[in-house]
Amino acid sequence: MPGRNKQPLAVIQGKGKSHHLTKDEISKRKKQEDAMNGFTDNIAPPKYLTKVQKREFEEIAKELLRLNIFSNLDVDSLARYIDSRDQYIQLIKNIKKVKPTIEAHQEDGTKITIANDDYPKLMRTKNLLFNECRSAAGDLGLTITSRLKLVIPKTEYEKPKSEAERRFGGRL
């Protein structure tokens, strides 16, 4: 159906909803999913990352490889995530130094508190960087919700086998 994300075969089978798939469709889909995983022979941090960012890249890439959800095709996405995350962290440090209001002196010498015009601009930039990081993290499987979509759910109970299934097994 349009608009729905295609779920991996293992997830469909884990939910116990693969009854609509034939054995032939299952084997074709398994072959297609295996081919789509991609190669992992050329995973290296891009040159435009700093030394610290490269170290972080290698740590995250190692964890994603352990989950079998990372390939050569994802290298640039991870690098962009790390770069935008660093920008976000630097901006947060700078925002802490800026006050949302400032004190101004009127002509008669009294002090008044007015809004700092730079603060809303910094907050908009912060929100943009946060959304960029969150989106990239979700795409890469770095958030709990994105990983839960990949986890094979355990079936709560196993359907009792019929007499024919006990006698003939999977040969029906």
Image (cartoon, rainbow, N blue to C red):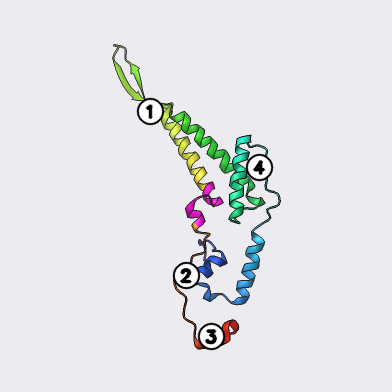
Looking at the image, do the residues carrying marks 1 and 2 touch, with CB atoms under 8 Å apart?
A: no
Q: Label 1 is placed on what type of residue? A: Pro
Label 1, label 2: how many angstroms apart (C-alpha)? 53 Å
- Residue 159 placed where, x, y %? 47, 78
Q: Is residue 34 visible?
A: yes
Q: Label 4, on which residue?
A: 45
Q: Label 3, on which residue?
A: 166
Crowding at mark 2 (Cα within 10 Å: few <14, some 14-19, many 20+): few
Residue 26 figure quarter = bottom right
Label 1, label 3: how many angstroms apart (C-alpha)? 72 Å
Callout 3: helix, strand or loop?
Answer: helix
**What residue sits 62% from the left and 50% below the top?**
74
Q: Identify the residue at the far right of this view.
A: 41
Does residue 47 lie above or below 36 as drawn? above
Front position among marks 3 and 4: 3
Does residue 117 lie above or below 147 as drawn? above
Callout 1: helix, strand or loop?
Answer: loop
Between disc 3 and disc 4, whose residue precedes?
Answer: 4
Residue 100: assigned label:
1
Between disc 2 and disc 4, whose residue precedes?
Answer: 4
Q: Label 2, on which residue?
A: 155
Looking at the image, do the residues carrying marks 2 and 4 touch, with CB atoms under 8 Å apart?
A: no
